[in-house]
Image (cartoon, helix red, strand yellow):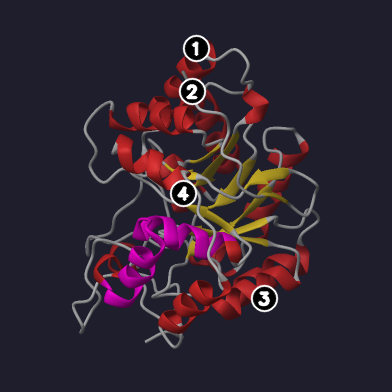
C-alpha cells in the first residue's frame, strides 16, 4: 500500500502550475536494467509526487512503466497528481529535434504531457543522421556554435511544445545569470524553472536570488552533494563533520538535514537513490530550527565546489568565470 503524498511544500511556478518542492531524481549511474523502474515505484509508494527525468538518462521507459504500474495499483492517485519533468539534450537543440525529443520522451513516459520541459544544458551540439550525439576526433562533443550563442530558435521550439500542450511549463537547466538574461530578452513564454546543482558546498546564493527576482523557480539537483571527493581537500559533503553534527543533534540523517536546508531556502530539491530505505528516509521531512539553519549556512559560506562539470565531455566550458 502506498503512503500518502509527502506533506512537503507545494510551490507555484510563474504560470500558476503547482510543483511539489520535494522531487525524486531518476538519473542512474550505470544502473542495472530495472533499477530505475524499481526506484520509481519505491519513490511513489513513499509519497513522492514529483519525478525528475531527462532524455539523456535513457531510462524514461522504466520511469513510464513504474508510473503506470503504480497508478494501476493505486486508483486513488491520478496522473495529474504526479509532476513529471523531462529535458532536451544538447544535440537536439534544432527546432525539429526539440519537437522530436519531447515526443520521444512522452512515448517512453507513457503520458500525453509533461509538467515541465527543460533545456538540459546551455550548449547546442551536432548530431549524427541517427540522432545520436556527434563526437569529434578529440572524443568531445562537436559544438553547434551558432545555436549555442543564439538559442532563440531552440527556445521558440520549447514555446511551441508549451503552446501545443505537450508541456505544462518550460524552463532551463544549468543556465547562468547571463544565459537566463539572454533567454528573457526574446522569450514570449518566460522560463519557469532553472535547475542547477545546489548543496552546502555550492550554495549558489547569487544565482538563487537572481532567479527568484525574475520569478524563475530554482530547482536543486545533487542537493545531497556527491560521492565524488572535493578537489584539493578530499572532503565530501557526506563526511563533513559539522554537517554530521547537525544531523546527530537532531536525531535524523544528514540527507534529511540537507533536504530541509534546501526547502527552507525556498526552492525544489531532487534527492536520488536506488535504495528503498533511503528513498523512504528522504521522504520523511524534518524542520530545521533557526539555529540549525544558520549552522548549515555558516558551513556553506564562501564555498563554491561544483561536482557536476561536463567540460571534459562537452569540450565547452559552461562556467568560464569560475576557475
Local SS, label 3: helix
Q: Are marks 1 and 2 in contact (CB under 8 Å)?
A: yes
Residue 59 position (above or below residue 215):
above
What is the C-alpha distance between the residues marked 1 and 4?
33 Å
- Dot 1 corresponds to which residue? 73
Q: Residues within 10 Å of mark 4 (few under 14, many from 20)?
A: many
What is the C-alpha distance between the residues marked 1 and 2?
9 Å
- Dot 3 corresponds to which residue? 210
The residue that appears at 22% across and 60% down in the rendered structure is 139
Camera-near label (1 vs 3) is 1
Local SS, label 2: loop
| Mark nearer the N terminus (1 vs 4) | 1
Q: Residues within 10 Å of mark 1 (few under 14, many from 20)?
A: few
- Dot 2 corresponds to which residue? 2
Q: Is residue 26 left or right of residue 204?
A: left
**Overall secondary structure of the magenta section:** helix
Whether residue 247 is visible here, answered yes or no, is: yes
What is the C-alpha distance between the residues marked 4 and 2?
33 Å
Q: Are marks 3 and 4 in contact (CB under 8 Å)?
A: no
Q: Which residues are magenta?
A: 240-263
Residue 59 disc label: none
Q: Residues within 10 Å of mark 2 (few under 14, many from 20)?
A: some
| Mark nearer the N terminus (4 vs 2) | 2
Question: Can you give x and y, in whole percent of width and height, for residue 195 in the image?
Answer: 54, 59
Camera-near label (2 vs 3) is 2
| Mark nearer the N terminus (3 vs 4) | 4
Q: Is residue 309 left or right of residue 102?
A: left
Residue 89 disc label: 4
Amino acid at each position: 500500500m502506498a503512503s500518502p503524498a509527502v506533506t512537503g511544500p507545494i510551490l507555484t511556478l510563474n504560470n500558476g502550475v503547482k510543483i511539489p518542492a520535494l522531487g525524486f531524481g531518476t538519473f542512474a549511474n550505470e544502473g542495472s536494467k530495472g533499477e530505475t523502474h524499481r526506484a520509481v515505484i519505491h519513490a511513489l509508494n513513499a509519497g513522492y509526487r514529483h519525478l525528475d527525468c531527462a532524455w539523456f538518462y535513457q531510462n524514461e521507459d522504466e520511469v513510464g512503466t513504474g508510473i503506470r504500474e503504480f497508478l494501476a495499483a493505486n486508483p486513488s492517485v491520478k496522473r495529474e497528481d504526479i509532476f513529471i519533468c523531462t529535458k532536451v539534450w544538447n544535440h537536439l537543440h534544432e527546432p525539429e529535434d526539440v519537437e522530436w525529443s519531447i515526443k520521444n520522451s512522452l512515448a517512453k513516459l507513457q503520458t500525453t504531457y509533461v509538467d515541465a520541459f527543460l533545456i538540459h544544458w546551455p550548449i547546442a551540439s551536432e548530431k549524427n543522421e541517427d540522432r545520436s550525439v556527434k563526437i569529434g576526433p578529440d572524443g568531445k562533443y562537436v559544438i553547434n556554435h551558432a545555436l549555442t550563442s543564439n538559442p532563440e530558435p531552440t527556445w521558440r521550439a520549447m514555446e511551441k511544445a508549451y503552446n501545443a500542450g505537450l508541456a505544462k511549463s518550460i524552463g532551463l537547466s544549468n543556465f547562468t545569470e547571463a544565459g537566463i538574461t539572454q533567454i528573457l530578452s526574446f522569450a514570449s513564454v518566460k522560463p519557469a524553472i532553472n535547475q542547477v546543482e545546489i548543496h552546502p558546498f555550492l550554495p549558489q546564493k547569487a544565482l538563487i536570488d537572481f532567479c527568484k527576482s525574475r520569478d524563475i523557480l530554482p530547482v536543486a539537483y545533487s542537493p545531497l552533494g556527491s560521492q565524488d571527493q572535493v578537489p584539493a581537500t578530499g572532503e565530501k559533503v557526506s563526511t563533513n563533520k559539522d554537517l554530521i553534527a547537525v544531523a546527530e543533534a537532531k536525531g535524523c540523517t544528514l540527507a534529511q538535514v540537507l533536504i530541509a536546508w534546501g526547502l527552507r531556502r525556498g526552492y525544489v530539491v531532487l534527492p536520488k537513490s536506488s535504495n528503498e530505505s533511503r528513498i523512504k528516509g528522504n521522504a520523511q521531512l524534518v524542520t530545521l530550527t533557526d539555529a540549525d539553519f544558520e549552522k548549515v549556512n555558516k558551513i556553506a559560506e564562501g564555498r563554491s565546489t561544483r561536482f557536476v562539470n561536463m567540460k571534459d565531455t562537452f569540450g565547452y566550458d559552461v562556467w568560464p568565470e569560475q576557475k
